[in-house]
């Protein structure tokens, strides 16, 4: 007498553990670096050389390409390519300056909030939520009213607005690290809080923080362009891309290059920075690498 064979069981397909090739993982990062480097090159060259002076109006009103004007001139007779180069420098300065302000204030406030307990923790968390909800444009108007409309005022306003976002992220990340057993062991062994932050907290949060700051750079560039469009950014003869878009609005049908050129460069820079952020996340975040394997 033969025993019945056990029923066949469906086997769960095994997940491939073959890691994604490094070349494929870094393609996004390389593409972002290439796009961003193009704008950065324009910005660096503009520091030492420009085809024309920023306030030179001798090119003729709305002239087409030619006579040394690669892209033509605007409604005031200024060279468009010169303005684009100057605008690239302003965009990079605005992005770097705003991120520096946001990182300095945000990391400091976020670490302090993470170490707070009880009602102080709740108060700081509510304060950060209020800052995040506060409109950047209104904050920029307040800063401009106090300091006048300059690129520095725009950078300060954008940096202050972004510092709340960075601080909330840092607070969450630091609290997560402080809950780990090795941090508890370090504190039990007598390690001071500054050494705990420097030796355990910051090394564990910096990959996520760097990705977030890269994203904040792109947002800062867009915010500066918006403020300049409204007249709250760098004053003339500084040719911010946002100001170029505002000035070319009335002549778009007759001279579209004045609006298309700064718009395209603005998109290129923001896309490049976002690709860098995606590439950094894939490279620095182990959890992301595991999910993509």
Image: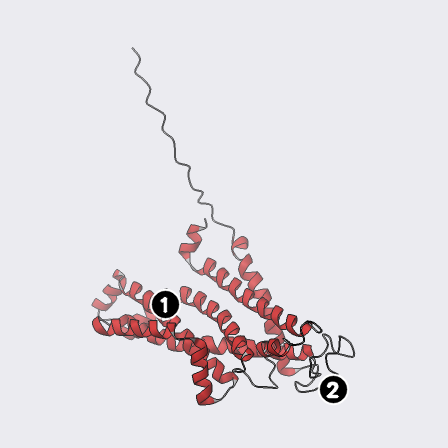
Residue 220: image x %, image y %? 49, 73
Q: Nearer the viewer, residue 26 or 227?
A: 227
Q: Left or right: where does residue 226 sit relative to residue 138?
A: right
Q: Nearer the viewer, residue 25 or 116?
A: 116
Residue 137: image x %, image y %? 46, 77
Q: Nearer the viewer, residue 22 or 234?
A: 234
Q: Left or right: where does residue 201 sit relative to residue 120?
A: right
Where disc 2 sits, the SS reads loop
**Residue 8 placement: quadrant:** top left
Cα separation between marks 2 and 1: 51 Å
Residue 193: image x %, image y %? 27, 73
Circle nearer the viewer, 2 or 1: 2
Q: Is residue 242 above or below residue 276?
A: below
Report whether residue 101 is seen.
no
Q: Left or right: where does residue 11 sit relative to residue 246?
A: left
Q: Is residue 186 above or below residue 79?
A: above
> Which residue shows up at 43% across the image and 55% down it?
288
Residue furthest top in the image: 1
Q: How is the image coloured?
A: secondary structure
Residue 258: image x %, image y %? 67, 75
Mark 2 or 1, nearer chain start: 2
Q: Nearer the viewer, residue 96 or 57?
A: 57
Which quadrant holds the N terminus? top left
Where disc 1 sits, the SS reads helix
Report whether residue 120 is seen.
yes
Which numbered disc covers residue 58?
2
**Residue 196 placement: quadrant:** bottom left
Which residue carries the number 1 mark?
Answer: 169
> Which residue shows up at 38% across the image and 31% down it?
10
């Amino acid at each position: 007498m033969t025993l019945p064979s056990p029923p066949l069981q469906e086997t769960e397909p095994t997940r491939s553990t073959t890691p994604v090739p490094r070349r494929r993982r870094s393609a996004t990062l390389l593409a972002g670096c290439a796009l961003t480097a193009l704008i950065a090159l324009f910005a660096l060259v503009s520091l030492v050389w420009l085809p024309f002076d920023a306030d030179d109006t001798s090119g003729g009103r709305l002239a087409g390409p030619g006579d040394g004007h690669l892209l033509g001139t605007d409604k005031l007779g200024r060279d468009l390519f010169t303005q684009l180069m100057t605008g690239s420098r302003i965009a990079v300065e605005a992005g770097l300056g705003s991120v520096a302000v946001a990182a300095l204030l945000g990391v400091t406030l976020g670490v302090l909030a993470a170490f707070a307990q009880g009602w102080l923790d709740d108060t700081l968390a509510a304060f950060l939520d209020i800052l995040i909800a506060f409109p950047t444009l209104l904050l920029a108007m307040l800063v401009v009213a106090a300091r006048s409309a300059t690129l520095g005022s725009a950078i300060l306003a954008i940096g202050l607005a972004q510092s709340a976002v960075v601080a909330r992220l840092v607070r969450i990340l630091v609290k997560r690290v402080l809950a780990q057993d090795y941090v508890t062991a370090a504190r039990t062994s007598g390690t001071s809080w500054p050494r705990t932050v420097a030796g355990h907290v910051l090394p564990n949060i910096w990959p996520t923080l760097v990705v977030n700051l890269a994203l904040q750079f792109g947002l800062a560039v867009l915010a500066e362009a918006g403020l300049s469009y409204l007249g709250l950014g760098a004053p003339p003869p500084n040719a911010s891309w946002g100001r170029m878009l505002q000035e070319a609005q009335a002549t778009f049908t007759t001279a579209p290059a004045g609006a298309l050129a700064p718009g395209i460069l603005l998109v290129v820079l923001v896309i490049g920075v976002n690709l860098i952020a995606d590439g950094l996340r894939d490279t620095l975040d182990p959890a992301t690498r595991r999910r993509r394997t």
